[in-house]
Image: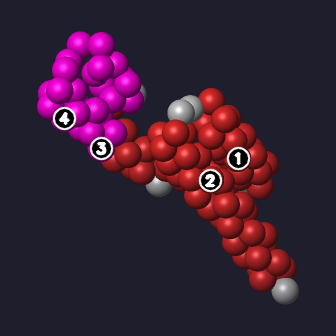
Amino acid sequence: MGGLVASTTSGTVLDGTQKDVATYTGIAVSMLAGSRIAKKPTIKAFLSKSSTLWFLFLFNGVVATVCYLAMDDVKGIATAVGMGLVSPAADAAEQTEIAQVSDAKA
């Protein structure tokens, strides 16, 4: 949570290089904490559920569309592309889960 707060609020307190350092450090802390949390069995089971993967797929697709329409120029396009890449990844994870269940039944 601290990494997310640092990366989003650094612009109100800091300027220039200090702002960039705080933002990227916050992002790194968030990613590290998120990856460690995602490895816990209860969270891993939740993230493997078909309904969760469908939600992530649809949510990321909607966010990509809104970012493209709401943001200006390159920033909107880059954000939409980034979110657009995440959306099929959630769908691919769901397809992998379905294939694994099918293989287990066979």
Q: Say which residue appears at 28% left-offset and 32% top-offset.
A: 23
Mark 3 or 1: the one toward you: 1
How dense is the environment of label 1, judged by Cα within 10 Å: few (below 14), some, or many (20 and up)? some
Q: x, y (%) of residue 103?
A: 78, 82
Q: Earlier in the sequence, mark 4 or mark 1?
A: 4
Mark on residue 61?
1
Badge 2: residue crowd in 10 Å (few <14, some 14–19, many ≥20): some
User: How far apart, in angstroms, are the residues tagged by discs 2 and 4?
Assistant: 27 Å
Quadrant including the N terminus: top left
Which residue does the numbered mark 2 point to in the structure image?
A: 84
Task: Indicate which disc, 3 or 4, sits on the residue closer to the N terminus.
Answer: 4
Q: Report the disc number at residue 21.
A: 4
The answer to whether any part of residue 97 appears in the image is: no
Q: Quadrant of residue 64?
A: top right
The mark nearer the N terminus, 3 or 1, is: 3
Which amino acid, mark 3?
Ala
Q: Which residue is mark 3?
A: 28
Q: Mark 2 or mark 1, which is nearer the start of the sequence?
A: 1
- Please report whichever mark, 3 or 2, sits nearer to the chain's N-terminal start: 3
Q: Residue 76: where, in percent of width, then height?
A: 54, 39
Q: Which corner quadrant holds the C terminus?
A: bottom right
Is residue 45 toward the left or the right of residue 17 in the image?
right
Report helix, strand or loop for mark 1.
Answer: helix
Q: Are marks 2 and 4 in contact (CB under 8 Å)?
A: no
Q: Closest to the observer: 39 or 77?
A: 77
User: Between residues 93 and 88, which one lies in front from this camera angle?
Assistant: 88
Kind of residue at badge 2: Gly
